[in-house]
Amino acid sequence: MAKRMANRQKKVNLLKRTSRKYLISAVVLMLVSLVPLYFVTQHFIRDETDDSLKSTLYRIEKLLGEGQPVKSIHPIIEVQETELTGGITLKDTLIYDPLESEMERFRQLSAYKKANGKMYQISVRILLVESEDIVLAILTAFLGIILIIFLAQYYFTRQHTKTIWMPFFENLHRIKTFSLLSGKKIELIETDILEFSELNNELYTLTEKVALDYKNLKQFTEDVSHEIQNPLAIMQAIIGTIIDDNAVNDQQFQQLTELQQNVQRLARLNKKLVLLAKIGNQQFASSGTLNIVEVLQQSIEDHQEMGSVSINMEAADPVEVHMDPTLARILTDNLLSNAVKYTPEDGQIFVNVTNTSFTVSNTGDQPIAAPEKLYDRFYREDNTKKSLGLGLAIVKKICDSYGLKIQYAFKAQYHQFSVYFPQH
């Protein structure tokens, strides 16, 4: 039970899981797409920058060819006569910008041109910071637009998915609340989605089969209980009559007594096995709120009347537990019977009740060798004890039915069985 609860806590809602994966993939795609967008944008801006530099160079060359003077504008345009010759070069360079009073990165186009019989070295430049700002602005705008698109798509996709899966979640709720004890068939919402429709058909078939099996098992349990109890009662009555007639010798009397004890043992075994089957079939449906302290007090009084072992109880205020009164009494009786059975004549039994649990402790010489087998059917730690080995199995079955947790411990020469109430 605890393991199932722990596993359930790790589970994630279907819509949350799909939405989370969508968002993660969207963010990854956006971030990945920024990289090629950055380089592609930078490449186009660089091409446009180079084209602009070539256009400016052409205009200056044309002006020089027409004999018009061209003044240098540092650091944007530099025109000077030279004796050198060379080709056209494009490069990035750092130049001091007097306007900003610092070194700035420029894209520079340099060329040697001849005009009116003179050789000129012409350098035109464009500040690269502006192009980088353009790239950054484009990336920011792209990121904002894509983010808005993804969020809108996420919202509409989530709403659409919720609408599609609505019949599934509603049917899941109906399956959780479905009970075989009601005797009614499960009602599921029909849908035009093929997979959901096929799932509904399989659920109808499965629940009908389970309901039929449950009905047959319940009937079988009742029939076995009735049919076995009657012959056993008759056998006990016949054995008692034979013994009362005094027509038997000592050896026959001993044999009949042993036979009667085994018949009684078989009757008890039948009752306990039928009880286990009824608990497993959830045939105890009259669950309500009861005071577990009162139930323990009644069990203690009955056991003290039958035995010589003293039983002391320490209880807090009334502790309310939601369970069937009959099963609550069986639970406390079996734990106390187990404690009485395995307590020495001079030993003691203590019952401690808190708001979260109750513990039955009894004197013992040594811890149980195989505590993991305590709740197995027909398991007995000590074969010398006349026990069916079903008492603790029934206790465990009752605890599992109501979400109770039972634990065994051996502390300070005491065997301790603690039952913890579910925390709501």
Image (cartoon, rainbow, N blue to C red):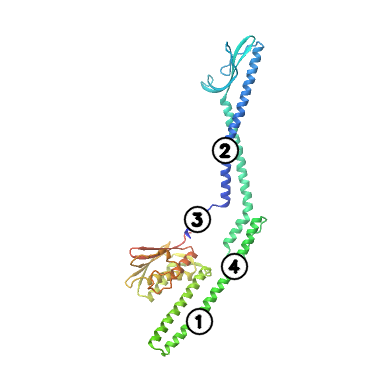
Q: Is residue 20 left or right of residue 328?
A: right
Mark number, residue 211: 4
Camera-nearest label, 3 or 2: 2
Residue positioned 62% across, 41% down in the render: 149
Camera-nearest label, 3 or 1: 1
Please say whether residue 295 is visible from this viewpoint: no
- Write down the residue under mark 2: 32
Residue contact at pointers 3 and 2, CB within 8 angstroms: no
Residue positioned 59% across, 34% down in the render: 36
Q: Is residue 367 above or below residue 6?
A: below
- Write down the residue under mark 3: 7
Please say whether residue 22 is visible from this viewpoint: yes
**What is the crowding at mark 3: few (fewer than 14 residues within 10 Å), some, or many (at least 20)?**
few
Camera-nearest label, 4 or 2: 2
Label 4 sits on a secondary structure element that is helix
**What is the crowding at mark 1: few (fewer than 14 residues within 10 Å), some, or many (at least 20)?**
few
- Write down the residue under mark 1: 231
Give the alpha-carbon distance from disc 2 to disc 1, as whole Å: 81 Å
Closer to the chain start, of discs 4 and 2, is 2
Camera-nearest label, 1 or 4: 1
Label 3 sits on a secondary structure element that is helix
Q: Quadrant of residue 336?
A: bottom left
Q: Is residue 311 above or below residue 121?
A: below
Closer to the chain start, of discs 4 and 3, is 3
**What is the crowding at mark 2: few (fewer than 14 residues within 10 Å), some, or many (at least 20)?**
few
